[in-house]
Amino acid sequence: MEIGTRVPDHGKITPWRLVVYQGAMREKVGRHLADLWQKKNPQADDETLDVERKRFLPAPVTIGVLARPQAHPKVPELEQMLSAGCVCFNLVHAAHAHGYAAHWVTRWFSFDTDAAKMLGAQDDEQFVGFVHMGTPEVAPQERDRPNLRDVVSYWHE
Ligand SMILES: Cc1cc2nc3c(=O)[nH]c(=O)nc-3n(C[C@H](O)[C@H](O)[C@H](O)COP(=O)(O)O)c2cc1C
């Protein structure tokens, strides 16, 4: 988490904070997620609810990153959100550098007010990611990456 929070932060305003989910809390979170999902989707079958129950189980530790942008004369909200995003990516890098695997997700519960509140968000905060971390069981698979020629241009007059 020390590595994760060493991020660019215009104005040094720390526009983010972390919530850790670990141990027995992972099952409790899953139960609450399944309950909320069922309340919002009364037709949900047990298989779907089971997915919610198990959301936080595969990884022994998950770190939620909350952006908490504040009005600032020189630092627009976008910059503060980007700083929070940097925390997520730094957490991923830190985990991998220590030999663990990590996955940055948002999923529905970042954007659902009730779920976000249950997970620890206050009214003026927004989850920008949950970083699941654990011991890798499979080698990461490479995927197609954008061709630099398609995404890079060289400015000229
Ligand atoms: C803000 C953000 C939110 C994401 N949310 C999800 C998600 O909810 N579910 C998911 O499968 N991947 C999500 N991803 C993508 C994964 O982090 C990751 O990029 C993807 O699994 C591919 O892995 P790779 O980029 O290492 O190849 C998200 C990425 C970002 C930047």
Image (tube, grey):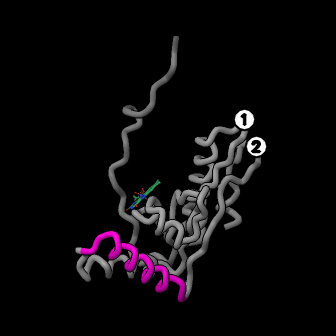
Q: Is residue 105 visible?
A: no
Q: Nearer the viewer, residue 131 or 94?
A: 131
Residue nearer the viewer, 124 or 152: 124
Q: What amino acid type should be assigned to the residue bearing mark 1?
A: Lys
Q: Find residue 93 and report its image quarter.
A: bottom right
Q: In this view, which residue lies farthest toward the top?
A: 157
Residue displayed at 56% across by 81% down: 22
The single residue placed furthest to the bottom in the displayed view is 24
Tell me if I can see residue 19 in this picture: yes
- The residue at 68%/48% (across/down) is 70
Residue at the right extreme of this rendering: 12
Element under label 2? loop
In contact (CB < 8 Å): disc 1 and disc 2: yes
| 27 part of magenta stretch | yes
Three-letter amino acid code at the position of disc 2? Gly
Residue drawn 37% across the image and 33% down it: 150
> Which range of residues does the magenta coloring cover?
24-42
Nearest to N terminus: mark 1 or mark 2: 2
| Position of 146 relative to 20 (above/below) | above
Q: Is residue 1 magenta?
A: no
Q: Position of residue 128 (x, y in %)?
A: 53, 57
Instruction: Please report the residue visible at 56 percent of the width from the left and 77 percent of the height from the top.
Output: 21
> For mark 1, what is the residue?
74
> In the figure, residue 141 lies in which quadrant?
bottom left
- The residue that label 2 is drawn on is 11
Instruction: Pinpoint residue 82: horizontal percent, then vertical percent.
Output: 58, 47
